[in-house]
Image (tube, grey):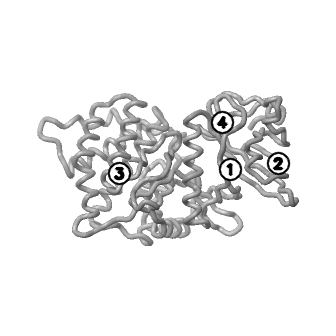
Amino acid sequence: MASSESAKTSTRNTTGKTLSPSSNGNVLDVPNSFIVDSNVLGKFPGGTKIISAHETVASAWTTTAQLQVQIDDGSEETYFLKLASGDHGRIMIEGEFNSMSELYACAPDFVPEPHSWGRYAKGNPDTYFFLSQFLKMDHTMPDPEYLCSKLARLHHDSNSPTGKFGFHSTTCQGRTSQCVGWEENWTVFFAKLLQHVIDLDLEVNGYWEPLDKVKKRLIKHVIPRLLDALISDGRSIKPSLLHSDLWEGNTGTLATNGRVYIFDAASFYAHNEMEVANWRGYYNKISDEVYTKTYLSYFPPSEPKAEWEDRNRLYSVYYNVIYSVNHESQGTAVRQLAFSDMYYLVNKFAPFPEGEAPPHLQESEIASLSAERDHTLA
């Protein structure tokens, strides 16, 4: 955290550059160590004063702060503020506001109330902000019963406004945008969703021919085989609202009453089973099987139930690939995991013709995930 003295001259943004206070009053000098732009204050009723503002945890792509404000009637309120910079920062911030607003509309007892989003009056590059209710939470592992019962209810009760799969604005997992344009057909939607992040991975982390070959066969043959079965023989699946980046780091528990809240969402409407596929990743503590088992006790697998495990593996590929895109070389082990899972599904449902299969990973080629990224070690 910056010292109070340095905070009077600059504040950090996600590019590592600084935002300098202007001489025309666009930056507010408030107590503690964080500078607040006048456009943030403009989101509150007239007469509101900022009592204090201090930086909290800074992620790789955003900066966050806690704001204490005094409303004109003398009452005080606390808010969470998140900043991100540049054109991509705008997409991240707008997407999070829309995600949290959609979640709050459906499950107001499960997410902090979003307040607003906007752009700083000054900043180079442009800086964007998201405001929401601040809740004092413990970041211990969430209670499985509480988390999974609330999550299952969200999936049951939510209804896509278009009746389709997708979302009305672009959302991001980490710094990576998701391909969430509306589609009537789940198979088509998921194929586009996965194709988008694998293409990004090949661009960001370098072309890998075996991955490209396995991806093409998976998308052409395996995805239709597994997902079309969900709507065969008169079956159907509903688009459910997903958080879509739900690991233990995006949950918190109120110390006062034990309620679990979720935040930092990257939402879209999808097959509900996709949500818990993110819990398959061994690098998160929420991979503990108690969470998936508890969720399934509230929301049983879709038919055909015998293929739930294969669908779970397929959906997890998406999360592992987007992890690889976000963390680049530090995500090599997870990229390899995605490749191995794709290859497993191809071998099971659409094997390569003899002589056309790319090489499998050799044991000597398998990378280890860095301790920094393996949250089970924390």
- Residue matched to label 3: 189
Query: Label 3 is placed on what type of residue?
Result: Phe
Q: Secondary structure at mark 2?
A: strand
Residue 162 seen from this side = yes
Q: Residues within 10 Å of mark 4 (few under 14, many from 20)?
A: many
Instruction: Please report whichever mark, 2 or 3, sits nearer to the chain's N-terminal start.
Output: 2
- Residue matched to label 2: 50
Instruction: Please report whichever mark, 2 or 1, sits nearer to the chain's N-terminal start.
Output: 2
What is the spatial separation of the Cα atoms under label 2 and label 1, in whole angstroms? 14 Å
Residue 6 rendering spot, x and y as whole percentages: 80, 31
Residue 362 seen from this side = no
Q: Secondary structure at mark 3?
A: helix
Residue 127 falls in which quadrant of the image? Answer: top right
What is the spatial separation of the Cα atoms under label 2 and label 3, in whole angstroms? 44 Å
- Residue matched to label 4: 127
- Residue at 64%, 59% (x, y): give it: 112
Instruction: Please report whichever mark, 4 or 3, sits nearer to the chain's N-terminal start.
Output: 4
Instruction: Please report whichever mark, 2 or 4, sits nearer to the chain's N-terminal start.
Output: 2
